[in-house]
Image (cartoon, rainbow, N blue to C red):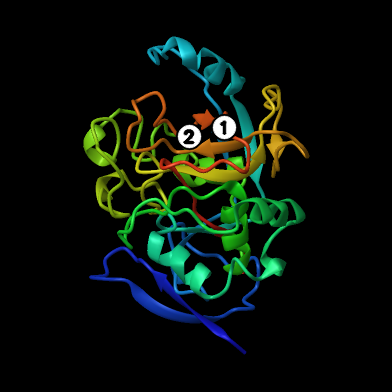
């Protein structure tokens, strides 16, 4: 039976303890938030336990959004409770250029089983990747939603839902930023920067589960389609987003973000799944085993 290496950070220990658990461990295994593992492709992930939080924006006082962002703010309303009934693994860092090249070198662009029908149509139009930058430790950008989806499938995972991404960033306390409620540009690669940095370059900005760069560096594709009236005041359980749409949501701000855009509740919604840009990357979620 294959085994995965799990790293558990325990209070009072000088470093992570190494535990070996079977890949088919019970789904209800009680793991501390932030437990680490190395997945089958050699990528570090952190554990996000099941839980509840308030999604969206509850208090708009002091946000002072620019005029163009008023419609964005409306889409974050109303704030509403969300319950995620199953824990999941999320990448500790944004997918790097090195990670993505492993997918390319493994024949990811030739293996049609990695691509959805719409993704295969995208490939027929574009034929080849268009990665921005060449530093292997920086987040991969200039990848479309279709490409991110195919890479995630190659990893044995998927893109996070909007709710999963936001919970991993905000936690049960529903923080405004991954580190807390006060803006601190020293904790993230945001406004004033000239480009991406190596992932994990700002350790002071980690989220409650130890995920890095969830504010700034690169925006991140999530699985949800956009619908401006999707949020409702009642409790939502494991929301998956609208079934269809034209625009995919991006989360997390980027290296040019101001305090408004870098908030964890913010979601960018201008781009179709075929769009590529130098400020958009992603990370992967896998199941609860």
Q: Which residue is mark 1?
A: 55
Q: Check residue 255 in the rendering and tell me which mark sits there, or answer none.
A: none
The x, y position of residue 63, in whole percent, is: 40, 16
Distance CA(mark 1)–CA(mark 2): 7 Å
Left or right, 200 with respect to 273, comes to left
Secondary structure at badge 1 equals strand
The x, y position of residue 76, in whole percent, is: 57, 23
Residue at x 40% of width, y 60% of height: 97
The x, y position of residue 68, in whole percent, is: 48, 14
Name the one closer to the observer, 68 or 17: 68
Secondary structure at badge 2 equals loop
Q: Dividing the picture into quarters, in which one does residue 242 lie?
A: top right
Residue at x 28% of width, y 40% of height: 189
Badge 2: residue crowd in 10 Å (few <14, some 14–19, many ≥20)? many
Q: Quadrant of the C terminus?
A: bottom right
Height in image: 133 above or below 71?
Answer: below
Q: Quadrant of the N terminus?
A: bottom right
Left or right, 190 with respect to 84, comes to left
Residue at x 58% of width, y 44% of height: 222
Q: Dividing the picture into quarters, in which one does residue 193 lie?
A: top left
Q: Which residue is mark 2?
A: 174
């Amino acid at each position: 039976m294959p085994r995965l290496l799990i790293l558990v950070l325990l209070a009072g220990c000088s470093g992570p303890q190494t535990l070996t658990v079977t890949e088919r461990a019970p789904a209800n295994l009680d793991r501390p938030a932030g437990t680490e593992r190395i997945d089958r492709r050699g990528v570090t992930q952190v554990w996000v336990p099941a839980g509840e939080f308030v999604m969206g924006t509850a208090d708009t006082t002091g946000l002072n959004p620019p005029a163009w962002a008023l419609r964005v703010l409306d889409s974050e309303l109303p704030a509403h409770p969300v319950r995620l009934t199953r824990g999941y693994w999320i990448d500790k860092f944004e997918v790097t250029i090195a990670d993505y090249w492993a997918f390319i070198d493994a024949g990811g662009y030739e293996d049609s089983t990695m691509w959805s029908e719409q993704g295969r149509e995208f490939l027929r139009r574009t034929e080849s990747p268009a990665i921005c930058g060449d530093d292997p430790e920086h987040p991969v950008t200039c990848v479309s939603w279709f490409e991110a989806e195919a890479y995630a499938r190659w990893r044995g995972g998927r893109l996070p839902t909007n709710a999963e991404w936001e919970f991993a960033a905000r936690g049960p306390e529903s923080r405004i930023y991954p580190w807390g409620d006060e803006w601190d540009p020293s904790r993230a690669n945001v406004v004033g920067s000239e480009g991406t940095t190596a992932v994990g370059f700002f350790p002071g900005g980690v989220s409650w589960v130890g995920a890095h760069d969830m504010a700034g560096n690169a925006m991140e594709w999530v699985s949800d389609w956009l619908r401006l009236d999707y949020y409702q005041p009642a409790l939502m359980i494991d929301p998956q987003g609208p079934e269809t749409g034209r625009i995919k949501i991006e989360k997390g701000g980027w290296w040019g973000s101001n305090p408004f855009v870098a908030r964890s509740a913010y979601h960018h919604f201008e781009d179709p799944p075929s769009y590529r840009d130098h400020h958009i990357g992603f990370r992967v979620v896998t199941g609860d085993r």
